[in-house]
Amino acid sequence: MPLLNPDIYTSEDYWALPDGRRAELIDGQLYNMAPPSRIHQKLIQELSRKIGNYIAQTGGSCEVYPAPFAVNLDAEDQNWVEPDLSVICDKSKLTDRGCSGAPDWIIEIVSPSSRRMDYSRKNTLYSDTGVREYWIVDPDKERTTIYRYEEDAAPAILPFSDVIQVGIYEDLQVCIAELLK
Protein backbone atom coordinates (compact mmCIF):
# COMPACT_ATOMS: atom_id res chain seq x y z
CA MET A 1 0.00 0.00 0.00
CA PRO A 2 1.47 3.40 -0.93
CA LEU A 3 2.27 5.88 1.78
CA LEU A 4 -0.41 8.53 2.01
CA ASN A 5 1.10 11.43 0.14
CA PRO A 6 -0.13 12.85 -3.15
CA ASP A 7 3.39 13.90 -4.16
CA ILE A 8 5.53 12.11 -6.65
CA TYR A 9 8.58 10.65 -4.92
CA THR A 10 12.03 10.44 -6.45
CA SER A 11 15.11 8.34 -5.87
CA GLU A 12 16.36 11.13 -3.59
CA ASP A 13 13.36 10.53 -1.32
CA TYR A 14 13.99 6.79 -1.43
CA TRP A 15 17.63 7.16 -0.40
CA ALA A 16 16.72 9.71 2.30
CA LEU A 17 14.47 7.25 4.18
CA PRO A 18 15.51 6.85 7.83
CA ASP A 19 17.79 3.93 8.67
CA GLY A 20 15.82 0.77 9.26
CA ARG A 21 12.79 1.89 7.28
CA ARG A 22 12.25 -0.27 4.21
CA ALA A 23 10.19 0.85 1.25
CA GLU A 24 10.17 0.51 -2.52
CA LEU A 25 9.85 3.30 -5.08
CA ILE A 26 7.61 2.32 -7.98
CA ASP A 27 6.32 4.82 -10.53
CA GLY A 28 6.82 7.77 -8.18
CA GLN A 29 5.12 6.16 -5.15
CA LEU A 30 6.78 4.82 -2.00
CA TYR A 31 5.46 1.50 -0.70
CA ASN A 32 6.23 0.44 2.87
CA MET A 33 7.57 -3.05 3.39
CA ALA A 34 6.38 -5.10 6.35
CA PRO A 35 8.88 -7.13 8.40
CA PRO A 36 9.17 -10.68 7.06
CA SER A 37 7.88 -13.78 8.86
CA ARG A 38 10.09 -16.62 10.04
CA ILE A 39 9.08 -18.88 7.11
CA HIS A 40 9.78 -15.99 4.72
CA GLN A 41 13.30 -15.65 6.12
CA LYS A 42 13.90 -19.41 6.08
CA LEU A 43 12.95 -19.59 2.40
CA ILE A 44 15.23 -16.68 1.52
CA GLN A 45 18.11 -18.25 3.44
CA GLU A 46 17.65 -21.72 1.93
CA LEU A 47 17.15 -20.47 -1.62
CA SER A 48 20.21 -18.21 -1.29
CA ARG A 49 22.26 -21.13 -0.03
CA LYS A 50 21.06 -23.54 -2.76
CA ILE A 51 21.60 -21.08 -5.62
CA GLY A 52 24.88 -19.76 -4.21
CA ASN A 53 26.27 -23.28 -3.72
CA TYR A 54 25.25 -24.19 -7.27
CA ILE A 55 27.03 -21.13 -8.69
CA ALA A 56 30.17 -21.85 -6.64
CA GLN A 57 30.25 -25.56 -7.59
CA THR A 58 29.81 -24.86 -11.31
CA GLY A 59 32.22 -21.93 -11.43
CA GLY A 60 29.43 -19.59 -12.49
CA SER A 61 29.84 -15.84 -12.66
CA CYS A 62 26.40 -14.82 -11.37
CA GLU A 63 25.94 -13.44 -7.85
CA VAL A 64 23.05 -13.94 -5.42
CA TYR A 65 21.80 -11.07 -3.25
CA PRO A 66 19.07 -11.51 -0.62
CA ALA A 67 17.01 -8.58 0.64
CA PRO A 68 17.61 -5.95 1.71
CA PHE A 69 19.35 -5.20 -1.59
CA ALA A 70 18.34 -2.21 -3.73
CA VAL A 71 17.59 -2.83 -7.39
CA ASN A 72 17.10 0.09 -9.77
CA LEU A 73 15.21 -1.79 -12.47
CA ASP A 74 15.14 0.84 -15.17
CA ALA A 75 18.65 2.18 -14.43
CA GLU A 76 17.11 5.67 -14.62
CA ASP A 77 16.53 6.20 -10.88
CA GLN A 78 12.73 5.86 -11.18
CA ASN A 79 11.98 2.38 -9.81
CA TRP A 80 13.83 1.02 -6.78
CA VAL A 81 12.70 -2.36 -5.48
CA GLU A 82 14.06 -4.81 -2.93
CA PRO A 83 13.34 -8.30 -4.24
CA ASP A 84 13.65 -11.07 -1.68
CA LEU A 85 16.32 -12.64 -3.88
CA SER A 86 18.16 -11.25 -6.91
CA VAL A 87 20.50 -13.22 -9.16
CA ILE A 88 22.69 -10.94 -11.27
CA CYS A 89 24.91 -12.36 -14.02
CA ASP A 90 26.14 -9.08 -15.54
CA LYS A 91 28.51 -7.72 -12.89
CA SER A 92 28.68 -4.35 -14.64
CA LYS A 93 25.18 -3.76 -13.21
CA LEU A 94 26.48 -3.94 -9.64
CA THR A 95 27.16 -0.63 -7.89
CA ASP A 96 27.80 0.51 -4.33
CA ARG A 97 24.05 1.13 -4.04
CA GLY A 98 22.97 -2.28 -5.37
CA CYS A 99 21.99 -3.25 -8.89
CA SER A 100 21.51 -0.78 -11.74
CA GLY A 101 19.34 -2.59 -14.27
CA ALA A 102 17.29 -5.76 -14.25
CA PRO A 103 18.61 -8.87 -12.48
CA ASP A 104 18.48 -12.09 -14.47
CA TRP A 105 16.35 -13.91 -11.90
CA ILE A 106 14.15 -12.51 -9.14
CA ILE A 107 12.39 -14.46 -6.41
CA GLU A 108 9.70 -12.90 -4.22
CA ILE A 109 8.31 -14.68 -1.16
CA VAL A 110 4.66 -13.65 -0.84
CA SER A 111 3.39 -12.28 2.45
CA PRO A 112 -0.18 -11.14 3.14
CA SER A 113 0.85 -7.48 2.76
CA SER A 114 2.76 -8.04 -0.52
CA ARG A 115 0.36 -10.39 -2.34
CA ARG A 116 -1.16 -7.84 -4.74
CA MET A 117 2.18 -6.13 -5.37
CA ASP A 118 4.08 -9.38 -6.08
CA TYR A 119 1.48 -10.95 -8.37
CA SER A 120 0.44 -7.85 -10.28
CA ARG A 121 2.48 -4.68 -10.20
CA LYS A 122 5.91 -6.26 -9.78
CA ASN A 123 5.13 -8.94 -12.35
CA THR A 124 4.46 -6.25 -14.95
CA LEU A 125 7.44 -4.18 -13.85
CA TYR A 126 9.83 -7.14 -13.98
CA SER A 127 8.54 -8.23 -17.37
CA ASP A 128 8.84 -4.72 -18.82
CA THR A 129 12.37 -4.07 -17.52
CA GLY A 130 14.15 -7.20 -18.78
CA VAL A 131 14.14 -9.67 -15.89
CA ARG A 132 14.59 -13.11 -17.48
CA GLU A 133 12.93 -15.26 -14.81
CA TYR A 134 10.59 -14.41 -11.92
CA TRP A 135 9.40 -16.77 -9.20
CA ILE A 136 6.61 -15.98 -6.76
CA VAL A 137 6.92 -18.38 -3.83
CA ASP A 138 3.62 -18.41 -1.93
CA PRO A 139 3.83 -20.11 1.51
CA ASP A 140 0.09 -19.66 2.22
CA LYS A 141 -0.92 -21.46 -0.98
CA GLU A 142 2.14 -23.76 -0.94
CA ARG A 143 2.87 -23.12 -4.59
CA THR A 144 5.38 -21.33 -6.79
CA THR A 145 4.43 -19.32 -9.86
CA ILE A 146 7.20 -19.21 -12.45
CA TYR A 147 7.46 -16.63 -15.21
CA ARG A 148 10.08 -17.08 -17.92
CA TYR A 149 9.65 -13.85 -19.80
CA GLU A 150 12.08 -14.75 -22.59
CA GLU A 151 9.88 -17.72 -23.52
CA ASP A 152 6.75 -15.55 -23.81
CA ALA A 153 4.66 -18.40 -22.39
CA ALA A 154 2.00 -18.72 -19.72
CA PRO A 155 3.35 -18.97 -16.17
CA ALA A 156 3.81 -22.37 -14.59
CA ILE A 157 2.19 -22.89 -11.20
CA LEU A 158 3.73 -25.73 -9.22
CA PRO A 159 3.06 -27.08 -5.72
CA PHE A 160 5.92 -26.93 -3.24
CA SER A 161 6.35 -30.73 -3.53
CA ASP A 162 7.27 -30.53 -7.24
CA VAL A 163 10.83 -30.19 -8.47
CA ILE A 164 11.26 -26.95 -10.41
CA GLN A 165 13.73 -26.72 -13.28
CA VAL A 166 15.44 -23.33 -13.12
CA GLY A 167 15.17 -21.55 -16.47
CA ILE A 168 18.44 -19.62 -16.43
CA TYR A 169 20.42 -22.73 -15.41
CA GLU A 170 19.90 -25.96 -17.35
CA ASP A 171 21.09 -28.24 -14.56
CA LEU A 172 19.70 -26.62 -11.40
CA GLN A 173 16.50 -27.91 -9.85
CA VAL A 174 14.75 -26.71 -6.71
CA CYS A 175 12.09 -28.37 -4.56
CA ILE A 176 10.64 -25.78 -2.17
CA ALA A 177 9.25 -28.49 0.17
CA GLU A 178 12.77 -29.90 0.59
CA LEU A 179 14.04 -26.46 1.60
CA LEU A 180 11.44 -26.22 4.36
CA LYS A 181 12.42 -29.47 6.12
Image (spheres, rainbow, N blue to C red):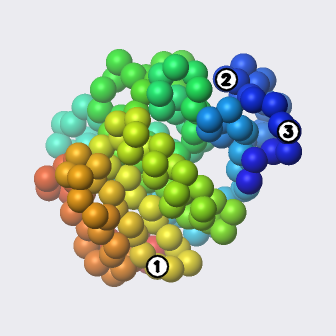
Q: Position of residue 6 (x, y in %)?
A: 83, 37
Q: Which residue is mark 1?
A: 142
According to the picture, the residue beneath numbered tag 2 turns out to be 11
Q: Amino acid at mark 3?
A: Asn
**Residue contact at pointers 3 and 1, CB within 8 angstroms:** no
Residue type, mark 2 in image = Ser
Q: Residue drawn 59% across and 56% down?
A: 117
Q: Nearer the viewer, residue 91 or 106?
A: 106
x and y, in percent, of residue 36 in the image: 66, 59
Above-or-below relation of 74 to 82: above
Label 3 sits on residue = 5
Q: Earlier in the sequence, mark 2 or mark 1?
A: 2
Q: Report, in whole angstroms, how far the alpha carbon at label 3 lies from the one at label 1.
A: 35 Å
What secondary structure is found at the residue carrying circle 2? helix
Instruction: Give the quadrant of the C terminus.
Output: bottom left
Residue 18 point in image, percent of width and height: 82, 31
Tag 3 secondary structure: loop
Q: Which mark is residue 164?
A: none
Q: What residue appears at the point 26 percent right and 41 percent down from the top-left corner?
A: 56
**Separation of disc 2 and disc 3 at Cα?**
16 Å
Callout in the foreground (3, 1): 3
Amino acid at pointer 1: Glu
Q: Is residue 150 above or below residue 80?
A: below
Q: Is residue 95 left or right of residue 103?
A: right
- Confirm whether residue 82 shows in the render: yes
Q: Is residue 181 above or below residue 55?
A: below
Q: Nearer the viewer, mark 2 or mark 3?
A: 3
Q: Is residue 160 left or right of residue 156?
A: right
